[in-house]
Image (cartoon, rainbow, N blue to C red):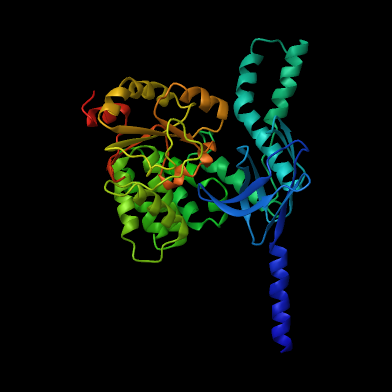
Amino acid sequence: MKKIFVLSAVVAALSIQAQFTVSVQTPSDFNSQDAILYSLNGSRDIIASTEKVKNGQLTFKYPNTYSGMMKVYFPGSNNTFSFISENKNVNIKLEAKNNKISNIIYQDEANNLMSKQQEGSQKKEVILPALSQIKEYYKDDTEFGKALKTEIDRLSGVSNAIDPAQHPFISYYNTNYSKFIGNDPSKKVSQDDFINFIDKSNDMLESSSLLRPILVAYLNGGGNANVAGSVDRLLDTLKVETPRGQTVLSELIDIFDVYEMKDLKDKYLSLAKNLKCTITDRLASTLKSNANVEIGATFPNNKFQSPVNTTAKSIYDVKADKKVIVFWSSTCSHCENELPKLLEKYNDLKAKNIQIIGLSLDADKDSYSKKIAAFPWINDSELRGWNSTYTETYNVHATPTYFILDANNKIISRPDHVGDVLEYFKLK
């Protein structure tokens, strides 16, 4: 019995050590009370916990070991800020103006160091080349010339060297960002290097935010001639039955969706659908998002938040022979070009009993409200930007995105552009 007790005590101690706290101090006039803590899996945010601000303090307790990127989201005001965890307590102070975060003060060692590293790296990549060009026009013995030289020397000396024993995640992030994503042309990375890294890396690959840009760099490095061949090489090494293989497969499906590489998306989506092994939550969510919007599928219903130009409570409550669903944003340049063309034909569509439902991925209420004043169709928005539930439910990666539904809310077409919408209804 004594041995069992000792073992239990050790397990309990490890459990306690694995837990860390995220503490956030908010200003007294900050009105957002509800908050969501997210961890990261590849490029997908995973809800870790929800809490409320109490007396200007927000506290999350994370029960598991985690090193990587995290973020806190305030849905009531659409405020978001990001930080890192090295499986140690995180302490952050927020400053706000008009209920919007204006400054983030990182008070724990890891985040303070990461913030300074990021600032130094950005200045080195963006500002240093410009200063070097400017310096050519000023003599070294002038006051401005001396100041330029001092700043150039300072930025040139900025180092990303971090002790991995003290700060394992910061070291991991900086080292692999520099090697695989950085803009140094002298550091040529072979496809074998990419594959070996993705295959052998520890779990921080999924939590670092590096996975998707590294995959894009890998595909670009292989050239456009045989992207499928590059993907097959990678997946053959990783094995799609493994958690890493399935995460990478999920990311690749999303990448091909974003870049409108339909044939490649369909090929690897089919591979995912036909897997006989246990499917991870990450890949399952990708499969579900895509299944929701396949031709012939019933378009998932959405309960409206604050609908305009309708008394309907949801998409299904809107009665019409056909419905055009358009996901858009007031900040989207393509929407600026396309939606006026839809507006020109609005009366013709209405005469055919075709309803347009605009679901906006806006975050700013004023910008959204001004824009919809010109749109006579049904409009609604969660005002959460890309944190909206629309993105995962309807597999939305870009705006505008269109769907055409029949009277029973079945998806009968997925037009690429407004011209395809009008062509479908013979109005072009």
Comparing 356 with 209, the one in front is: 356
Horizontal and vertical percent position of residue 348: 27, 24
Q: In this view, does 415 lie to the left or right of 17?
A: left
Asked if residue 285 can be seen in this view, the reply is yes
Comparing 28 with 9, the one in front is: 28
Q: Which residue is drawn at 64% across and 29% down?
A: 124
Horizontal and vertical percent position of residue 293: 34, 46
Task: Name, please, the residue furthest toward the front.
Answer: 311
Compared with 240, 253 (above or below) is above
Asked if residue 360 can be seen in this view, the reply is no
Q: Is residue 226 left or right of residue 331?
A: left
On the image, which quarter does residue 374 sit in? top left
**Quadrant where the N terminus is found in the figure:** bottom right
- Count up the numbered dots: 0
Comparing 29 with 40, the one in front is: 29
Q: In this view, does 5 lie to the left or right of 290?
A: right
Q: Residue at x 30, y 23 (%)?
A: 347
Q: Is residue 369 left or right of residue 58?
A: left
Q: Residue at x 54, y 36 (%)?
A: 383
Task: Name, please, the residue furthest toward the bottom.
Answer: 1
**Quadrant where the C terminus is found in the figure:** top left
Q: Which residue is drawn at 49% across and 42% down?
A: 213
Compared with 388, 60 (above or below) is below
Task: Name, please, the residue furthest toward the left.
Answer: 426
Comparing 149 with 359, the one in front is: 359
Horizontal and vertical percent position of residue 37: 63, 50
